[in-house]
Image (tube, rainbow, N blue to C red):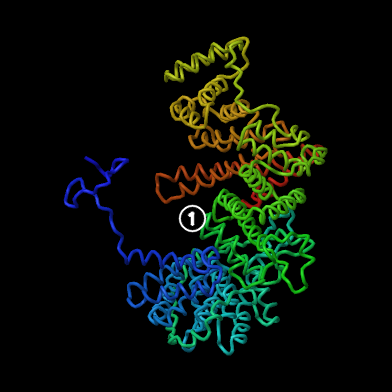
Amino acid sequence: MSSYRTPIRSRKRGREESDTGFRPNRANPQELLGYRIKKDITFLADPRVNPVVTEDINYVAMSVSRESHEEESVSAILNCILETALSIPIKVAHLATLMMRAALKAPLLAERGVEILQSKLVFSLEQYDYYQAKIVFRLLICLSRIYESEGVEPIFTKFLDRLGEQTAPSTFGDQLLKIVLIDIPYYCVASKHPEKVALVEDWIQRCASYVELRKPLLHQVRNPFSNSEEYTEEELDLLYRQLVLEKDNGLQFSYLPRPWEAFESDLAKVSPVISKSFEWSTSVSEEQLKSPSFRPFVEIFHTSEIRTTPETLNIASSVFRDVTVDIINHLEYNRMEAAQILTDLDVYFTYKTFALRGTPIGELPKLDAEESRWKVEDIITEAIFSELLTSKSAFKPVYYHSLLTECCRVAPKILAPTFGRIIRFVFNISENLPMGTFEKFINWFSHHLSNFNFFWKWQEWVSNIELEDFHPKKVFMRETISKELELSYWSRIRDSLPEPLHQLMAPEAPKPEIPYEDESHPLHANFKEVTNHLRIHKPIEVISSALKSVEENPTSEISGVRFLMACAYSLGSKSLSHASNTFEKHLDVIKHFSRESLLTEMETIDVLFSCWRLQPSTAVIWLSKMLNYSIVSITSVFRWLLDQKDSSIWAKSWTWFLMHMSLEKMDARLETVNSDNENLKELIRESKEEKDTVLNLLFTELPKRKSEYESVPWIPHWIQLIQNNLESVYGQISE
């Protein structure tokens, strides 16, 4: 007897009515057709499918039009078009052209499409889904050729009316302004309105009053590549000024795609669509009227001798950045596809907008004067790094790390030189970098090297080994190597470095150092006794007695809590999971001794870092777990850190990570317990008191440490950067 569940089936199929018979399911032809159309729409204009865009649009339009005669099918197709536009916004113009071309044989698609998109636009605004509103509005704009009379002009007017009602900068106002400004270029290339230039000029002028409201707050914007308070361009303010300048240049936007131009004769035969009046009068919530957050317009290649990205005041820089960031942030569920779309970005813009992919920097001066010097690889990497280095990034840093890695795998010969230029640029200005950028960049750099066999031209930087120990360039190299050691074997990293840089590594492979494990140690017998007590869960009284005998030992000068924690760390030293298990199994005993006082908490931390002297980053991870279990308090972490006599800790990445991690836990804890529940009021009060204590401690003690180490080269620099970073997050609250 055979069964379809067994690895090998009989060739003979049983009867269908038999219990043991098997007949494979045949897919519904309609489902297969729907799947194929969805796939065709998703991959529309993709160079991997058909390099001739007009042929691809024509082919998919024919398939879509055949299935667009029933309401249900039309709704499914329109949903697919909208999903594709939201995930891959660079295809909005191509998707709009597809709808218009298909409407030649299926008018229902255009009629229902405009109706559904207008409803989606209102719904998005009411739900404060500004990204969806921006893309839906752009799709409506690109459908302008099939409107009977007025199309999107009343929508622009309504947006500007609502914007004019704002009396102070707000999240709502900023997002509405962004939708209007960034979609104006698409209106200029898509609309056939006879007075579109005059309309656009009026719209830009109507934005001026709100832009002026924002100006007094722009001093908050910080340049991620400078630790000074110099002004840097803010994204929205820059976009407005770019449009004002573009108005004087004729509003051409020659780089934006116009796929509908290949179908002008066909589109003239499409039945015009009457656009319904746009109704949106919903009041704005208090949350949306709060002060907005401002984002700097981050540039990396602006200092190059040959400009490979658009000039700052050229609106092309904002248009490219907008669509690139949207792809980064809305294709996060498939970073491989995101990387592919990004590396093919030039295909979706007008031909010859960019220089040929992979053109070396040295070859750009040889191009004809009218040829573009813009490099698409520079534009996409600059956009990804702008997201990575911005303090309020949409995702965790590892997403941007993996996306950059994937881009490099898709087009290594093109992107590897670009990455090299970015790394050298950041290394050369490391003396001027703020703490956040410095830390994020070395985290990315080490992670990136781990994905490419740790290969880097370290020989270029060997001469920097002669710099002072805490010079930013030397710290950059040492901390990158330290991060690499967390990602691979000590010998593997050592072999990847030139011999002069070996001195920046630990002298041997890191491992926990617990002296009592040595049988020759005078306290080895006590160590075995206490460890066994923990292992078999002896009562606290028995463990206290054993620790007391250690303290009374004339050859010992160690406190009971230090000895106990050394035993606990020994039990959990094999791995992080062993550490977690140890804390969970012996939590009552450990907390009984560690939380006796602030001093015992600091001793608990001190023993941890003594055990992991050669790999303090591991100790930080352990400490993170200990904070979760409340084995020590956040206050004790900073007390211990400020009490350290070794000035070098302020120039170590593990110190910065320890501070960030502890402060994030402090803020998260306060948010978690922030409730009106009467039972939580005491916990809220304690959390607020701890936050005030920690911040006052830092703002009081850091300036003292800076003065104390004034004679040590570069140490005051690192302490100042830490203080600046704290002030940017919490403000100057020292009292």
Q: What type is the residue that disc 1 sits on?
A: Tyr
Q: Which residue is mark 1?
A: 333
Residue 344, compared with residue 566, is above or below; it is: below
Which residue is at 57% across, 42% downward?
Answer: 661
Indicate the quadrant containing the N terminus: top left, top right, bottom left or bottom right.
top left
Which residue is at 60% across, 82% downward?
Answer: 200
SS of the residue under disc 1:
loop
Which residue is at 43% across, 78% downward?
Answer: 102
Horizontally, is 127 left or right of 309 in the view?
Answer: left
Q: Quick one: 651 or 35, which is closer to the camera?
A: 35
Q: Quick one: 182 or 233, which is closer to the camera?
A: 182
Q: Quick one: 511 or 217, which is closer to the camera?
A: 511
State which quadrant residue 258 falls in. bottom right
Counting from the top left corner in percent of width and height, residue 76 is at: 37, 69
Residue 295, compared with residue 509, is above or below; it is: below
State which quadrant residue 251 falls in. bottom right
